[in-house]
Image (cartoon, rainbow, N blue to C red):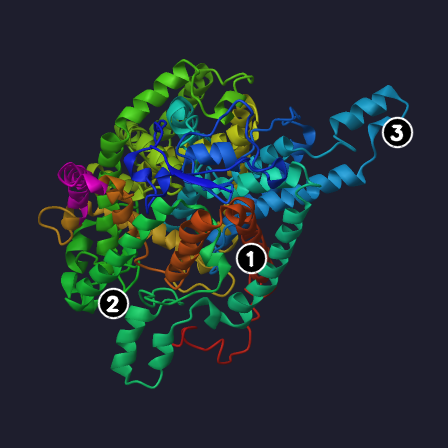
């Protein structure tokens, strides 16, 4: 019979900050059982030399996953079979699926229906083809000639498809879009500025934009990869799926069968909300109840409760059953992260409604939610009306036309993004400073206690000079582009962009590693670019790309380095394949972009587009660049939106206030609050669909609040695996529907109109 006793919390590891504490006092309860360690058949192996910390929580003999140490010790196996990773098969499959993911991603930038190829979808495709390669090719041992055996072994014929090959191939395929930002700029130049970017400029700029961020991740990996607390929670479904597909498949047969069933059920179900009955994508009892109400009442109800259509409303208590919007991320993000998002959503509902109905920023002159620019009378603002042929702002035309305006919801979104950026910097410095220093010292002495880090010590590290050499090449490539190319971005502006990205990247990586989600930092890049390069929208695009890509790619590389640490892929293989994939994908993206823009130029410039092609995404990029090129007029002391840049200053103070409150009320230290995340989610969805918000909350409560704490056996065994299955099943069907009925192949075939697929908003709000 289990003995329940009170035990003091053990010493926290690096980065296990105060806000990582669990709720309800569970961190202090230890259930002592005769055999607390789960069996290897459940995929929860632990190193024999690694003892669980004193504050581990057990329920019926199964550990509750609460922090990075628990993930390392109980969820992710430290097993390393020493199988090869860099093989002909892994490179070939990775390259083929890089082409697939890159081409589809670029194709959908110019489509009215934009989708992203999910990492789990690519992971499953690579596994199917890797297993087929193993099962359908002859073994080299069947041949007597040595040269034939050597060739077939090189081609991996008849050889088992291992986990490391799988990771490398999926890594290559998923990293093919790292240079996408640069290619998008070239599309804007071709469409709106009639500039055909020279091939040399495109190659050098893409190389520079795509690889600068890698250097930051490499330098910072002792802080953002090695420690156990740097989990990168949103990728746990991938890691668990890798290990279940390759480790002890006989013992894991039960889980794999359930995985297959979940994929099938998710795929069949997705046809209904995505095509046959879109009402399932936004179920609102309030919208249904108001169907016969007066028009004015229905309009107000739609703004508050509607959310199934883009820019319809806030989606309060509107539930979606469409998994393509929910996704497994809410099954994997830690409870501490989701609590902060829920608080943020609560603020979001109050603030956006108050701004609109209070007519702040003349809100009622414009749509309730929209990302477009407007004139003061509410008509759409045409950016071409204030541009010179050279692509800069014509001040005379601007004076005649007037400044563009944005919706109150967009103002709130921009403001909260800046709040979050300021809060990100302060929160990391205040709450994680000591742990950062400790993690760095542990890395230098190779004493980081995480079992997965220790398991990687046998592999040669990437020398720092590799990263420095890569940065030098990327830096000089960008320097040449801005000196010789027609970017309108001066060299000093290019250097400022890199410095800004390099400053923000460490903070963003730390938060992402700890919480599984980061802070949107693209806006600060555009804001600074507008301040230092007024009237130059093209310079704004290039500045933001170099600056923000430093941050984004540092996070991406750190994320994959962590997957490599969990799956024991050698460091140098991870480095080389990331660089290879980025360059390969950028070349493919550029070729596809050039072809589409050249052949479909007229329709892409049309604000409406058609059912096959649309330039709305590229138009939006250009509109944002123009808006921030007017930063001194729109966001200065005399501008209408001064509150937006002030958000950074206010955001810097939020964690300080949080820290001061803890000093006054020590009990607050047990609450997993993060003011940067709260601010981020207080303005997270100020346009687009919102019906998924309450579904994500329900999934998070079920998974992280109830299942993880009350039934850890089921949580540890199935939570991440089934989440990956649901993602895969939904993504497969969305991919099929996109080409079969959504119009990606040329002709759309909409489902007939009926009550579950109405002409108007799917949730029956006005």
Magenta stretch, main secondary structure, is helix
Q: Which residues are magenta?
A: 644-668
Cα distance in 3D space between marks 2 and 3: 74 Å
Earlier residue among tags 2 and 3: 3
Cα distance in 3D space between marks 1 and 2: 38 Å
Q: Residue furthest left?
A: 638
Is any part of residue 289 visible from this angle? yes
Q: In the image, residue 58 lies at what x, y percent? A: 46, 41
Q: Which residue is mark 3?
A: 142
Q: Quadrant of residue 364?
A: bottom left
Q: In the image, residue 166 lies at what x, y percent? A: 63, 36
Q: Nearer the viewer, mark 2 or mark 3?
A: 3
Residue beneath the point at 42% across and 44% down: 184
762 with respect to 15 (left or right): right
Local secondary structure at mark 2:
loop
The residue closer to the viewer here, 544 or 698, is 698
Q: In the image, residue 697 lies at what x, y percent? A: 38, 57
Q: Which mark is residue 379?
A: 2
Earlier residue among tags 1 and 2: 2
Earlier residue among tags 1 and 3: 3
Local secondary structure at mark 1:
helix
Local secondary structure at mark 3:
helix
Residue beneath the point at 63% across and 58% down: 264
Cα distance in 3D space between marks 1 and 3: 41 Å
Q: Which residue is mark 1?
A: 730
Q: Is residue 331 above or below residue 158?
A: below
Report crowding for label 2: few under 14, some 14 to 19, many 20 or more residues within 10 A (C-alpha).
few
Report crowding for label 1: few under 14, some 14 to 19, many 20 or more residues within 10 A (C-alpha).
many
Q: In the image, residue 115 lies at what x, y percent? A: 49, 54
């Amino acid at each position: 019979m289990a003995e329940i006793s009170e035990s003091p919390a053990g010493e926290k590891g690096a980065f296990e900050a105060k806000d990582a504490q669990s709720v309800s006092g569970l961190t202090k309860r230890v259930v002592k059982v005769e055999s607390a360690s789960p069996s290897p058949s459940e995929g929860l192996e632990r190193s024999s030399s690694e003892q669980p910390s004193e504050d581990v929580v057990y329920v019926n003999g199964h550990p509750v996953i609460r922090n990075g140490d628990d993930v390392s010790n109980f969820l992710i196996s430290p097993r390393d079979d020493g199988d090869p990773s860099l093989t002909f098969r892994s490179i070939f499959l990775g390259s083929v699926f890089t082409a697939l993911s890159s081409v589809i991603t670029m194709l959908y930038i110019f489509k009215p229906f934009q989708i992203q190829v999910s990492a789990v979808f690519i992971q499953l495709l690579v596994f199917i083809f890797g297993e087929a390669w193993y099962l359908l090719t002859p073994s080299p041992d069947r041949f007597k000639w040595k040269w034939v055996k050597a060739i077939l072994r090189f081609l991996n014929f008849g050889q088992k498809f291992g986990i490391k090959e799988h990771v490398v191939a999926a890594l290559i395929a998923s990293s093919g879009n790292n240079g996408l930002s640069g290619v998008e700029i070239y599309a804007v130049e071709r469409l709106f500025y009639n500039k055909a970017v020279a091939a040399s400029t495109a190659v050098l700029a893409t190389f520079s934009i795509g690889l600068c961020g890698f250097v930051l991740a490499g330098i910072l990996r002792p802080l953002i990869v090695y420690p156990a607390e740097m989990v990168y929670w949103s990728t746990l479904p991938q890691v668990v799926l890798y290990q279940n597909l390759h480790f002890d498949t006989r013992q894991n047969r039960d889980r794999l069968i359930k995985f297959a069933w979940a994929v099938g059920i998710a795929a069949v179900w997705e046809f209904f909300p995505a095509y046959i009955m879109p009402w399932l994508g936004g179920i609102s009892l309030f919208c249904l109840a108001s169907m016969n109400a007066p028009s004015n009442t229905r309009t107000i109800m739609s703004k508050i409760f509607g959310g199934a259509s883009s820019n319809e409303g806030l989606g309060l208590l509107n539930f979606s059953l469409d998994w393509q919007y929910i996704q497994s991320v809410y099954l994997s993000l830690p409870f501490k992260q989701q609590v902060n998002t829920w608080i943020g959503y609560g603020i979001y509902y109050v603030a956006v409604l108050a701004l609109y109905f209070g007519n702040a920023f003349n809100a009622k002159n414009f749509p309730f939610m929209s990302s477009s620019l407007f004139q003061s009378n509410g008509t759409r603002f045409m950016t071409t009306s204030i541009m010179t042929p050279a692509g800069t702002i014509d001040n005379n035309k601007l004076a005649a036309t007037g400044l563009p305006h944005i919706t109150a919801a967009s103002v709130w979104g921009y403001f909260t993004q800046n709040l979050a950026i300021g809060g990100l910097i302060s929160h990391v410095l205040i709450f994680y400073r000591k742990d950062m220093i400790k993690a760095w010292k542990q890395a230098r002495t190779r004493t980081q206690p995480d079992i997965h880090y220790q398991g990687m010590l046998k592999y040669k590290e990437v020398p720092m000079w590799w990263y420095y050499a890569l940065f030098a090449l990327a830096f000089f490539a960008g320097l040449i582009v801005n000196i010789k190319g027609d970017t309108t971005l001066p060299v000093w502006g290019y250097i400022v962009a890199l410095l800004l990205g390099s400053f923000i990247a460490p903070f963003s990586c730390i938060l992402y590693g700890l919480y599984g989600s980061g802070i949107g930092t693209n806006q600060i890049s555009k804001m600074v670019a507008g301040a230092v390069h007024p009237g130059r929208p093209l310079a704004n695009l290039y500045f933001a790309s170099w600056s923000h890509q430093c941050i984004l790619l540092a996070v991406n590389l750190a994320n994959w380095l962590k997957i490599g640490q969990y799956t024991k892929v050698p460091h140098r293989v991870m480095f080389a394949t990331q660089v290879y994939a980025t360059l390969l994908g950028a070349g493919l993206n550029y070729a596809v972009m050039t072809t589409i823009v050249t052949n479909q130029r007229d329709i892409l410039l049309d604000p409406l587009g058609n059912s096959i092609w649309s330039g709305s995404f590229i138009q939006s990029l250009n509109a944002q660049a123009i808006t921030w090129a007017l930063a001194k007029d729109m966001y200065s002391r005399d501008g209408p939106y001064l509150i937006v840049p002030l958000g950074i200053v206010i955001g810097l103070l939020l964690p300080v206030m949080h820290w001061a409150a803890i000093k006054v009320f020590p009990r607050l230290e047990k609450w997993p609050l993060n003011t940067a995340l709260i601010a981020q989610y207080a303005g997270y969805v100020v346009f687009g669909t919102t019906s998924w918000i309450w579904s994500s909350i329900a999934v998070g409560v079920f998974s992280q609040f109830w299942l993880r704490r009350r039934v850890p056996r089921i949580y540890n065994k199935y939570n991440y695996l089934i989440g990956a299955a649901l993602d895969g099943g939904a993504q497969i069907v969305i991919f099929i529907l996109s080409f079969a009925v959504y119009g990606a192949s040329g002709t759309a075939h909409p489902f007939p109109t009926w009550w579950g697929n109405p002409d108007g908003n799917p949730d029956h709000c006005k």
